[in-house]
Image: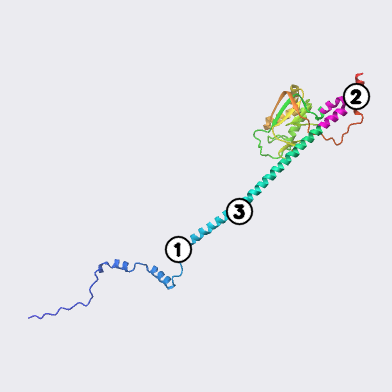
């Protein structure tokens, strides 16, 4: 009869039910990366010192916002404090300007009154010492207003000329920039005198035997009074003849060259009646009337008529 061997028991432990899911089990048991685990352990060993980067960033941003708000607040407070002081200073400056302007206007009125008084006394002196010829002397000297037929000559810069400034208006030659220069007006005035003008004014400024036409920077001065273009030259005389003689003169031809070659604008026309003011004031420092000149002039006139 065959002998049966007893069955031997297995020494290996029973397998886990989730043995087939070893990858998922490993993920569950080690959810954190080893690096994170070490960092957490290090922070725990240090007693929780230090703050996370995100928290530090938020605290830094909050501190910056607080600082910016403080700066804005301080600036606004300083503006509110200084605003009344600035307004006060501005008002004081405005008051000073208005006061100085008013004072300048009063001085100008005083100058005008004194100038009129000087002109009146000059006319009285001419009538007193000039006898019957005092009025003629006053007319020729520019000491009294005049009116009569004549010409109107308007001279202006070329259209292309830059009114903002192309250097000074002094010139010893032609106006190659298209701007009227002091020499140009000098030649125009001399040409009108030569052509028979009896009285001349530029932009209302009466010319006399002592008048000067010069330039200072961007302005032309007539007896130190600045004038701006266009320059209106009024001359009393025989209108038609005066205009024709001037245009045919050398100075008239000079003005024509300025028109054709450099674009300077000029227009002359005869006028039936022109009114010119008296010269502001005439100051004679050297010439003096000869004693008894009025009586001598009257005697000479009497001899001529006898």
Closer to the camera in the image, 191 or 230: 230
Name the side, left or right, on which 252 lies relative to 60.
Answer: right
Name the side, left or right, on which 224 lies relative to 125.
Answer: left
Vertical arrangement, residue 54 with respect to residue 184, above or below = below
Q: Which residue is labeled 3 in the image? A: 81
| Secondary structure, magenta segment, majority class | helix
Q: Is residue 224 visible?
A: no
Place of residue 82 in the rendered image (x, y in percent of width and height, measured from the top left): 62, 52
- Locate the N terminus by quadrant: bottom left
**Can you tell which of label 3 and label 1 is closer to the viewer?**
3
**Which comes before the other along the chain, label 2 or label 1?**
1
Vertical arrangement, residue 298 with respect to residue 214, above or below = above
Place of residue 19 in the rendered image (x, y in percent of width and height, measured from the top left): 25, 69
Q: Which residue is labeled 2 in the image? A: 298
Assess whether mark 1 and mark 3 are in contact (beta carbons under 8 angstroms): no
Vertical arrangement, residue 270 with respect to residue 284, above or below = above
Residue in the picture at 57% in, 56% down: 74
Residue 141 quadrant: top right
Estimate how packed mark 2 is, as few (under 14), some (14 to 19) or many (20 or more) residues with alpha carbons within 10 Å. Answer: some
Give the SS element for disc 2.
helix
Give the SS element for disc 3.
helix
User: Which region of the structure is painted magenta?
Assistant: 120-138
Q: CA distance from mark 3 to mark 1?
A: 39 Å
Closer to the camera in the image, 134 or 203: 134
Q: Which residue is labeled 1 in the image? A: 55
């Amino acid at each position: 009869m065959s002998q049966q061997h007893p069955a031997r028991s297995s020494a290996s432990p029973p397998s886990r039910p989730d043995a087939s899911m070893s990858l998922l089990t490993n993920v569950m048991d080690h959810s954190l990366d080893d690096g994170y685990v070490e960092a957490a352990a290090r922070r725990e060993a240090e007693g929780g010192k230090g703050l996370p980067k995100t928290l530090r960033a938020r605290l830094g941003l909050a501190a910056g916002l607080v600082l910016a708000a403080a700066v804005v607040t301080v600036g606004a407070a300083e503006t509110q404090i200084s605003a009344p002081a600035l307004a006060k200073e501005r008002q004081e400056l405005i008051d000073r300007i208005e006061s100085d302007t008013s004072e300048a206007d009063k001085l100008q009125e005083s100058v005008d009154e004194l100038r009129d008084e000087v002109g009146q006394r000059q006319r009285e002196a001419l009538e007193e010492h000039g006898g019957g010829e005092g009025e003629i002397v006053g007319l020729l000297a520019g000491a009294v207003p005049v009116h009569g037929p004549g010409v109107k000559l308007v001279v202006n810069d070329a259209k292309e000329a830059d009114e903002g400034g192309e250097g000074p208006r002094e010139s010893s030659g032609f106006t190659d920039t298209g701007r009227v220069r002091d020499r140009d007006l000098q030649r125009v005035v001399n040409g009108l005198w030569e052509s028979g003008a009896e009285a001349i004014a530029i932009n209302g400024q009466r010319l006399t035997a002592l008048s000067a036409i010069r330039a200072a920077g961007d302005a032309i001065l007539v007896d130190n009074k600045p004038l701006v273009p266009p320059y209106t030259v009024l001359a009393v005389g025989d209108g038609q003849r005066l205009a024709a003689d001037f245009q045919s003169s050398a100075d008239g031809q000079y003005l024509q060259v300025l028109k054709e070659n450099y674009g300077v604008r000029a227009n002359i026309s005869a006028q039936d009646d022109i009114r010119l003011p008296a010269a502001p004031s005439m100051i004679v420092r050297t010439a003096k009337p000869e004693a008894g000149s009025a009586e001598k002039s009257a005697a000479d006139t009497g001899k001529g008529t006898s």
